[in-house]
Image (cartoon, rainbow, N blue to C red):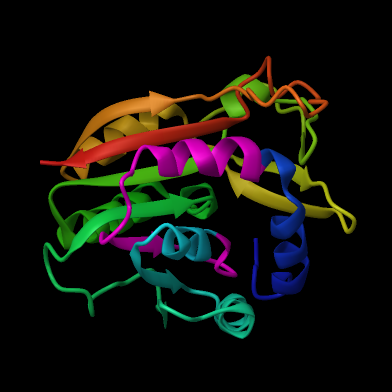
């Protein structure tokens, strides 16, 4: 998916994404609490939606992305207290070894074409984390939601899901956006993280708990896969 071309559309979706804001992000960030005073790397920050949430909870945030148009939107909206940086080919060489408390990567690895490239990025993040630092990866949970529709997502039906294959879904908002990603299983994420020097602590598949929302299956089918990995 070329997010340079759809940066404005993606930003509009991200501000309306009920499923993300009420299920995925809260559970993922909860794992990293307390955030106050911590230095957090938001890897693949996009238009800064999570970076701002991290900052508002008291974290020092370094936010990186390969898409300059995405970063332009992030800096236009609100750059106070966030160190936004453009990166080429996923590299974060400017960050010192063992200088980051935790890292967060939302909907990043589902855009990585090859296993080798995913491991390289994981290794680069592992390098900058302090001992016992956590990497949290948040992605859509294709294994449990293949072919299903939710408030903010409509998954294509893919027969015989295989890691590394291209998959498609619609991000639902006032201006729906079709995106193509790559599927990686929870088992493959665990293997890649281990190869990159992490202990895979846990995988999480949260269900919706807010009873004031009329869900479209988020309370029955876990829409998100969250991988929690600890630096050795």
Residue 19 is drawn in which quadrant? top right
Residue 14 is drawn in which quadrant? bottom right
Q: Relative to residue 183, is residue 159 drawn left or right?
A: right
Residue 211 is drawn in which quadrant? top right
x%, y% of residue 40? Answer: 31, 61
Q: Is residue 28 magenta?
A: yes
- The residue lying at 33 percent from left, 36 percent from top is 228
How many callouts does the rendering have?
A: 0
Q: Which residues are magenta?
A: 20-49
Q: Residue furthest right?
A: 174
Foreground pick, 194 / 130:
130
Is residue 164 among what the camera can see?
Answer: no
Foreground pick, 215 / 58:
58
Foreground pick, 107 / 26:
26
x%, y% of residue 192? Answer: 29, 39
Judge whether 108 appears above or below 74 on screen. above
Judge whether 39 appears above or below 193 on screen. below
Q: Relative to residue 211, is residue 34 drawn left or right?
A: left
- The residue lying at 86 percent from left, 53 percent from top is 176
Foreground pick, 129 / 93:
129
- The residue lying at 70 percent from left, 66 percent from top is 11
x%, y% of residue 102? Answer: 27, 53
Q: Residue furthest top?
A: 220
Judge whether 224 appears above or below 119 on screen. above
x%, y% of residue 88? Answer: 40, 78
- The residue lying at 79 percent from left, 25 percent from top is 215
Q: Quadrant of the N terminus?
A: bottom right
């Amino acid at each position: 998916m070329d997010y340079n071309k759809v940066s404005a559309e993606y930003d509009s979706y991200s501000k309306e994404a009920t499923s993300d804001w009420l299920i995925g992000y809260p559970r993922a960030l909860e794992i990293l609490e307390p955030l106050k005073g911590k230095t957090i790397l938001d890897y693949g920050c996009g238009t800064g939606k999570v970076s701002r949430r991290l900052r508002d909870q008291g974290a020092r945030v370094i936010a990186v992305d390969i898409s300059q148009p995405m970063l332009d939107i992030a800096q236009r909206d609100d750059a106070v207290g966030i160190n936004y940086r453009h990166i080429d080919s996923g590299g974060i060489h400017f960050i010192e070894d063992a200088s980051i408390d935790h890292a967060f990567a939302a909907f990043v690895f589902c855009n990585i074409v090859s296993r080798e490239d995913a491991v390289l990025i994981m290794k680069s993040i592992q390098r900058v984390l302090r001992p016992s630092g956590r990497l949290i990866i948040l992605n859509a949970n294709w294994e449990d939601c293949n072919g299903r529709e939710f408030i903010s997502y409509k998954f294509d039906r893919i027969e015989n899901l295989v890691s590394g294959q291209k998959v498609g879904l619609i991000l639902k908002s006032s201006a729906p956006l079709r995106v193509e990603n790559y599927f990686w299983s929870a088992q493959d994420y665990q293997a890649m993280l281990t190869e990159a020097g992490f202990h895979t602590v846990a995988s999480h598949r949260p269900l919706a708990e807010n009873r004031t929302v009329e869900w479209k299956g988020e309370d029955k089918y876990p829409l998100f896969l969250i991988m929690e990995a600890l630096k050795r």
